[in-house]
Image (cartoon, rainbow, N blue to C red):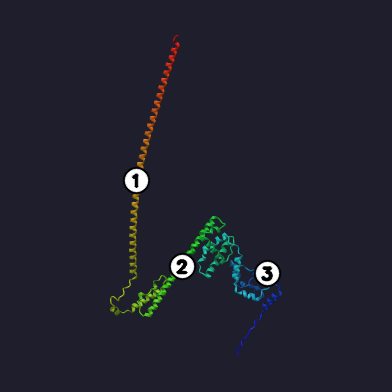
Amino acid sequence: MAPQHDSYIILPTKATMRTRSKARAAPPPSPKHQENKSPSPDWEVDSQGKLRTPSEDRESPAEKELSPFVPTHSESPSPAPSGVSEHEGQEDEGTDPALSAVQSQNACSPPWLPWHDRALIMEAEKHRPFNAARGDASKNAWDTLAVELLKSSTLNGALINRTGAACRARFQKLVKAHKADETRSLQKTGTDEEVNEHIELLTQVVELIQAHELEKDERSTASRRKADVETKAALELRDAAMKGLVRRDHLTDVAQLAGASVREKQGQRNHKRKHDETTSDSDKENMSDADEKPKRKRGRNQLLEIVQKRNTADSKRLDKARQLDEKRYAETQQLQNRAIALQENLVAGMGQLTEGIGALVHAQATVAAAEAKRVEDRRYEESERRREEAERRAADAERYANLLQALVNRPN
């Protein structure tokens, strides 16, 4: 005989029946009204018959005033859109109303202006939300930055009402643009001093991000190295437990790790102390010199030995550096002496060249004087020749004149 199961029937409440009756009585919306209708949140009916959204139940009026990215609602609820059934409201209960409000505000927010970017980078450098851990810590850090950005912009006479997610997305975009040397192209307004200060501040922020990432990588590397050493020590202890007897100095000492806890170090010391107490004097007498372990040096002696080793190493390095300096000094002296010799040879050559030039000038002057004297003698000889020619012509003319006079005066 098959077992019988109790069946239950869910009866609608008065508020649900009232809502359904209103939905049936209301005329269907026109296509034009459906096109202009904006998406509405999930409506619910309270015990008093009023309509409210889930976001109004989750946030108090004080939280609405402090939140920079959740829009405030008026006290009087707006009428619910007609044609919305109860099943449709239940299907939308999975979506977060606060998240949908944030997304709708980000979609409707005006674009980022250059002075918005400068204010965002200033607040990011001050609060450094990029150093927060992933998850809720990062989200809370960026939400805090959005609140501080709203407060600071309100004090400056403007208003920057953005969400934490929007601030984070814009910050990542600015960092990417700065790495591509496109920061100045994004700053289309503002003085040169403001733009230069913004670029310098953004450079510091990028350096902080890189330093934080490098520190995380170093921490992860150190933690992996420590985990590897601890795993190796655990495997050695397991093998030692299976073998029964293993020398302790052949095992990996986890107390020597940089991040070893005080409890691990104390456990190593307690183990050695118990081992020393269990060793009796008779056993020590029966032990040979070869079986005796070397006594552990005290911390002070070890410290002195370490200091001496370091001093010896430093002395060797100093001697090597001194020899290298002496060698460099000798090479420098040789180069200087060679340069001085070249300069002296150059000066001597310049002197000889000067003397040669002087001799050449003197020879040219002598030749010029001789040429001038020869020209003068030639001119003098020419003048004398011309004078003699003139005198000869004058004598001939006088003789011809006397001859003519004699011919004229001679009687017939």
Question: Which label is found at residue 345?
Answer: 1
Identify residue for label 3: 34
Chain-order first, disc 2 or disc 3: 3
Q: Position of residue 316 (x, y in %)?
A: 33, 62
Identify residue for label 2: 217
For the residues bearing labels 2 and 3, Cβ distance under 8 angstroms: no
Chain-order first, disc 1 or disc 3: 3
Q: Is residue 25 left or right of residue 395?
A: right
Rate crowding at label 1 as few (under 14), some (14 to 19) or many (20 or more) other CA atoms within 10 Å: few
The quadrant where residue 13 appears: bottom right
Q: Residue furthest bottom?
A: 1
Q: Position of residue 377 (x, y in %)?
A: 38, 28
Gap in Å between the C-alphas at discs 1 and 3?
A: 103 Å
Rate crowding at label 2 as few (under 14), some (14 to 19) or many (20 or more) other CA atoms within 10 Å: few
Gap in Å between the C-alphas at discs 1 and 2?
A: 64 Å
Q: Secondary structure at mark 2?
A: helix
Chain-order first, disc 1 or disc 2: 2
Q: Nearer the viewer, residue 237 or 378?
A: 378
- The residue that appears at 44% across and 12% down in the rendered structure is 407
The disc labelled 1 sits on which kind of residue? Asn
Image quarter where the N terminus lies is bottom right
Q: Secondary structure at mark 1?
A: helix
The quadrant where residue 347 appears: top left
